[in-house]
Image (cartoon, rainbow, N blue to C red):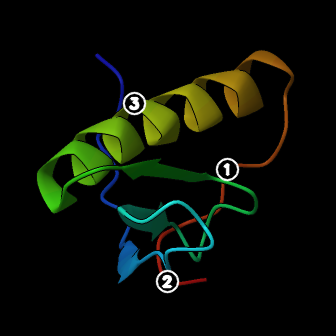
Amino acid sequence: MAETIKYSFEVRPLSNEDGRGYLVTFPDLPGCMSDGETIEEAIANAMDAEHSWLATAREFGDAVPRPGN
């Protein structure tokens, strides 16, 4: 079974110019982000993005950072 790693994430509201809603980013995972119209949707989408980011890194043999690094 694969190790479960918990990464922290940040949620911020998007401006009207940026389409409103919410943006979620993962400070420890460069380029890993997602958005949604509600906080709940943004976080759910971000969990999918996190999973995809980690799966892609492992598939290509890229280093997977430890949380907090």
Name the image quarter holding the N terminus: top left
Q: Nearer the viewer, residue 29 or 25?
A: 25
* Tag 1: amino acid: Val
* Secondary structure of the residue carrying numbered label 3: helix
Marks 2/1: CA–CA distance: 12 Å
Image spot of residue 28 (x, y percent): 60, 72
Q: Earlier in the sequence, mark 1 or mark 3?
A: 3
| Mark number displayed over residue 4 | none
* Tag 3: amino acid: Asp
Marks 2/3: CA–CA distance: 20 Å
Count the numbered circles shown: 3
Image spot of residue 32 (x, y percent): 63, 53
Name the residue beneath numbered marker 1: 64
Name the residue beneath numbered marker 2: 68
Give the mark toward the camera: 1 or 3.
3
Relative to 51, does residue 65 appear above or below in the rendering? below
Relative to 64, does residue 19 appear above or below in the rendering? below
* Tag 2: amino acid: Gly
Q: Residues within 10 Å of mark 3 (few under 14, many from 20)?
A: few
Q: Residue at x 61, y 83 (%)?
A: 69
